Image (spheres, rainbow, N blue to C red):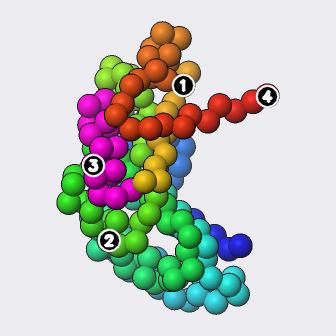
Amino acid sequence: MAGIYVHIPFCKKRCLYCDFFSTTLLARREEYIAALLKEIEIRRDETGEPFRTIYIGGGTPSTLEAKDIQHILYAIGTDEAEEITMELNPGDATEAYMHAIRRAGVNRLSIGIQSFDDELLTLIGRRHNAQQAIEAVHMAQQAGFDNLSIDLMYALPTQTWSIGKRTLNKRCSWECNIYHPTG
């Protein structure tokens, strides 16, 4: 089963903890998209089979316009894709954007919430707050996303067990399946 990861390196603001390649030079997005589309065209036949999973990560893919996401997915080809995931910063979430990326073909969102504690979010350089994170999940559900994941971080500076526990126990109006790794 073939899958592809597409890295979108753009961020509106660089998070202090991030080790992934990213840039805040948003003016270069159009140039990057053009190069990415050309690369996809050149390498189209390398896998020998269609992609079943497509993951658009970053950086912050939600810094792109929905039409850019649509162009990328069209270039890759989604006819046989079962899951098309895109990472989203809650600070980029609007109802219009959620509907547009859904129409573009994205059927799963990975929302980078990181914490429901506003002080911690500020400390690690996130540009959203806890309320925006909750609203992003609601907007995603209203746009028809029924396959969602949320990223939560632990062992952050100044994060106590009680703050971490509050994050885990945060009651939202959506169903969450929390993965508990063993070992």
Which secondary structure is most common in the magenta stretch? helix
In front of the other: 31 or 8: 8
Is 143 above or below relative to 38?
above
User: How far is disc 3 from disc 2 in space, using C-alphas?
Assistant: 14 Å
Residue beneath the point at 34% across and 58% down? 144
Q: Which badge, 2 or 1, comes first in the chain's sequence?
A: 2
Quadrant into which the N terminus falls = bottom right
Can you identify the residue that label 2 sits on?
Answer: 103
For label 1, the residue is 154
Comparing labels 3 and 4, the label whose residue is closer to the camera: 3
Secondary structure under tag 4 reads: loop
Residue that sits furthest to the right in the current view:
183
Q: Which residue is mark 3?
A: 139
Disc 1 or 3, which lies upstream in sequence? 3
Q: Residue at x 39, y 56 (%)?
A: 145
What span is in magenta? 129-145
Q: Which residue is mark 4?
A: 183
Q: Is residue 118 magenta?
A: no
In the image, what residue occupies the spot 27% across and 63% down? 99
- Amino acid tagged 4: Gly
